[in-house]
Amino acid sequence: MKKVIVIDDNTVSLVLIAKILNNAGYKAIVTDDATNALEKIRQEKPAMIILDIEMPEITGFELCRKIKTQDDLKDIPVIFLTANQETDTLVEGFQSGGVDFITKPFRKEELYVRVRNHIELAESRKTIIEMNKSRDKLYSIIAHDIRSPLAGILQTIDAIDQGFFDPSSELFREIIRDLKGRTNETNTLLNSLLQWTRMQDKSVALNPKMTNIYDVVKSCISLLELNAREKNITIELKVKKNYEAFCDEVSIHTIFRNLINNAIKFTPENGKVTINAKSGIRYVEVTVEDTGVGMSDEIINKILVENEHYTSFGTHNEKGTGLGLMIVKNFVQRNKGTLKIESKEGYGSKFTIGIPALPRNSSIPKKRTKVTEKKSE
Amino acid sequence: MNKKILIIDDNNEFRRLTKTILMSKYEVETAINGIEAFTLLQSGYMPDLIVTDLMMPGMGGKGFVEQLKSSGVFQHIPVIVLSSIDKSDEKIQLLQLGASDYLEKPYNPSELLIRIENIFKFRV
């Protein structure tokens, strides 16, 4: 319930306004003590402040100005109560930071509407600021994740251009494979990003249907086979050919492509990536397991717990797991699936994706979207 | 006799690329982070110059330069720092710690070679 704090030296007025606000569904907090108002506001953290103007110790305008100097309180909208409708008063009120006026006597509907409108406005503004912050963080992560492989590509091409490699040598062929790998990486990232952006537009519907999981996984593996072979990594596919699940094929493809790509990237030479599937009543569970470097619990938590407010992984991780996994998590949620991450540093990681086995409105009750985390010993 | 250069970088491809570039003129050894580099140094390997990346797990470039330049035996070895981060205060910090030069990745291979050559030519 949203709180509205009312400060007025007239107790009759306070009681009246409190009654109107309470009836309208707000929690009214009243005080006639204007001098200690700041503490009270800070304590209660209301969605709206209503101030009387003509008060003995401090006027409403002065109090408003004081409130606006406080970083943690300045975004709370302030409405003034006055008996005076003169223009000078109005102007001074707005200049001191108020957003609206209610002149006494007033109708209760008027109070209600003005309060409601300004609370909604303040909330929209707050949401927009938060969204912008998230987006800015996302942009810097993207820039970083794409910049890395591109820097490598540029450097290698420069070196080839300047004649550091003998074109007939085996080393040269290796370098070319390097280039291909990194270009693919950047391409994958950009494609995932494009998809993710499209999916943020909630009006763009996913196209969920019964999808053959074996086919999707197999297709991802063929895309990434070369990368694996270069590091002599074995990919073992243990998914039954007839496993089907209800999901949007394109986004599921992106999920597996990202997971398998990461598995290969973070597994040292001669390692192994295993893809397994298990068919359950509610979900088809597909696991992507590697014998790679693993992840710390801290990083797992960051992926699973910190949602829209995506934080950077710090210096250790400029290799770009960040964006890929964020996309995986997002896509899993959109497909009403589940995600579980188990990992041990130095041993490997195991990602388990649960995809709904049946369409949503089937007879078997569907679980709500769930994202869980479990640490392995 | 060719001068010896030690390359420190945790990224396989980058390490190999830089090694190939430097091998055209110098004898090159590599390490994947600061700790491995120190192990090499303490085993008796004395390079004439060190090229190090900044971001590495374990001991990074900054820690390495700090330690190197405060060690009695190794502080005379010139160090070039490579980084993919474009921050001038970090650059200044590393130069203050004693790095001889600081290059941003991706670097122009010829530029790296010339800077190394200059260090060898004009240093006593």
Image (cartoon, coloured by chain):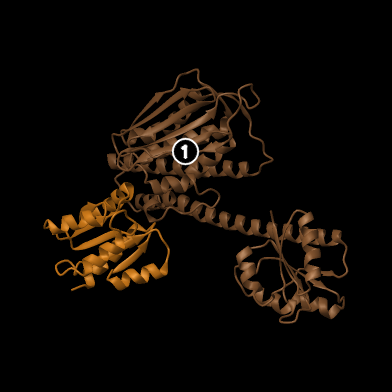
Chain colours: A brown, B orange
Residue B40 on image: x %, y %: 16, 55
Give the quarter of the image for residue A239.
Answer: top left
Q: Identify the element where label 1 is drawn.
A: helix
Q: Is residue A223 above or below residue B108?
A: above
Residue pictured at 43% horizontal, 30% vertical:
A287
Q: Note whether A5 is above or below A155 in the view shown.
A: below
Which residue in the protein does label 1 denote? A258
Q: Which residue, as the protein is rendered here, is positioned at the far top?
A: A242
Residue at 78 percent of width and 65 percent of height: A15
Q: Identify the image quadrant of the C terminus of chain A.
A: top left
Towards the viewer: A142 or A206 = A206
Label 1 chain ID = A
Residue B27 rendering spot, x and y as whole percentages: 19, 55
Which is more toward the observer, A341 or A274?
A341
Between residues B63 and B116, which one lies in front from this camera angle? Answer: B63
Left or right: residue B120 versus residue A318 is left
Three-letter amino acid code of the residue under disc 1: Asn
Left or right of B121 on screen, residue A182: right
Q: Position of residue B84 (x, y in %)?
A: 39, 58
In which quadrant of the rendered view does residue A73 lie?
bottom right
Can residue A362 be seen in this snapshot? Answer: yes
Tell me how many marks there are. Answer: 1
Viewer-proximal residue among B51 and A128? A128
